[in-house]
Image (tube, rainbow, N blue to C red):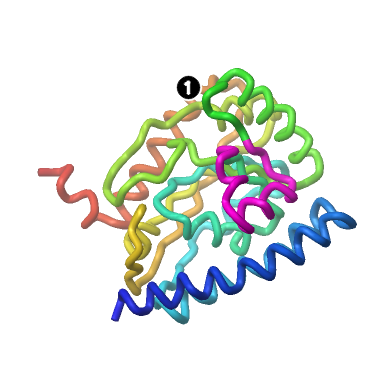
Amino acid sequence: MRFLRSLLYLAWLIVTVAPYAIVLLILSLFLRGTPLYRFALGWVHLSIWGARFICGIRSRVTGMENLPDGPVILLSKHQSAWETLAYPLIMPRPLAYVFKRELLYVPFFGWSLGRLDMVHIDRSKRTEAFSRVEKQGSRILKQGNWIIMFPEGTRTARGEQGVYKTGGTRLAIATGAWVVPVAVTSARCWPRQAFIKTPGVIDVSIGKPISPAGRKPAEMMAEVEQWIEAEMRRLDPEAYAHASR
């Protein structure tokens, strides 16, 4: 049954993304910025609706009261594609993702990303990549939008921990934006690189904002990492049971 539901969900994504992306690409000739972002959210709603009603994947969000009213850089755990789709619907401001430029070549989905106000980088050129993040990130934050980054750089398997890189905290210090850590248990229902989706509840926990004033990137990221990983173990203790043996 899970296989059939997952197959139906994949078909749902394919059927909906193509026409939506075509319209978005046409609209992008006349609209840019927030209006185009708002239009793109229509397909995001469809994708999350499909995950809920086809695959039985629901979500529970805590900590919304921790979100400050001002420039914010969200630094989140990254376990699946679910959070990349869900966060724009959860957060009160338009989000700009920092992502690897290879995604731009994904038919329809990637083409649409390229027309939105996001930050795509070449990971093989680290100095140039951060320069791009800092320049575009500063502009986006001044517009009132928020930046979202995954400090581990890629999706991690359930119960695993990657290396937290300091790009997000470096950007926060350079721009004066608050950093907000986010923990998410998406791999419980939508495992990394797995086709089969499992019904259940994904927890999203939003931590308290961290000021960059007087901070250094490494020690600031250490605080982010400590909170996220502790919260992951609280939210999904079964996944980390092996680590305590």
Residue found at the very far left of the displayed protein: 245
Left-right relation of 90 to 233: right
Q: Residue at x 75, y 62 (%)?
A: 24
Q: Which residue is mark 1?
A: 218
Q: Is 234 located above or below residue 97 in the figure?
A: below
Q: Nearer the viewer, residue 78 or 7?
A: 7
Q: Residue at x 37, y 62 (%)?
A: 190
Please identify the quarter of the rendering in which residue 31 is found.
bottom right
Q: Secondary structure at mark 1?
A: helix
Q: Residue at x 69, y 63 (%)?
A: 21
Which range is magenta? Answer: 100-120
Which amino acid does the dot numbered 1 rest on?
A: Ala
Where is the N terminus found, in terms of image quarters? bottom left
Left-right relation of 168 to 245: right
Please identify the quarter of the rendering in which residue 212 is found.
top right
Q: Position of residue 66 (x, y in %)?
A: 57, 52
